[in-house]
Image: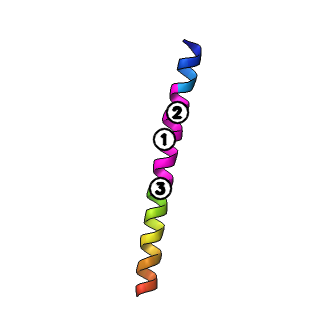
């Protein structure tokens, strides 16, 4: 059970981090594109 308890949260955190990185990247790209267009 210890292995499951440690691996599951790690996987969830990894997924959340990846999602957050993609969202931040999209926001930065959108802002940069808007500034470039303006």
Q: Tell me the distance, in whole angstroms, between the alpha carbons under discs 1 and 3.
A: 11 Å
Taking the spot 46% from the left edge, 84% from the top edge, the residue there is 36
Q: Are marks 2 and 1 in contact (CB under 8 Å)?
A: yes
Q: Is residue 10 above or below residue 23?
A: above
**Dot 2: what SS?**
helix
Please name the residue that numbered disc 1 is placed on.
Answer: 15
**Residue 17 painted magenta:** yes
Label 3: which residue? 22
Is 35 rendered above or below residue 9?
below
Q: Which residues are magenta?
A: 8-22
Where 26 sits versus 31, above or below?
above
Taking 15 as reference, is 9 above or below it? above
* Mark 2 and mark 1: Cα distance apart in space: 6 Å
Say whether disc 1 or disc 3 marks the residue closer to the N-terminus. 1
Image coords of residue 20 (percent x, y): 47, 51
In the rendering, which numbered label is found on residue 11? 2
Q: Secondary structure at mark 3?
A: helix
Quarter of the figure with the N terminus: top right
Graded by Cα atoms within 10 Å as few (under 14), some (14 to 19) or many (20 or more), the crowding at tag 2 reads few
């Amino acid at each position: 059970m210890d292995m499951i308890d440690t691996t599951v949260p790690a996987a969830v955190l990894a997924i959340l981090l990846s999602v957050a990185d993609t969202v931040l990247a999209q926001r930065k790209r959108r802002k940069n594109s808007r500034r470039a267009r303006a």
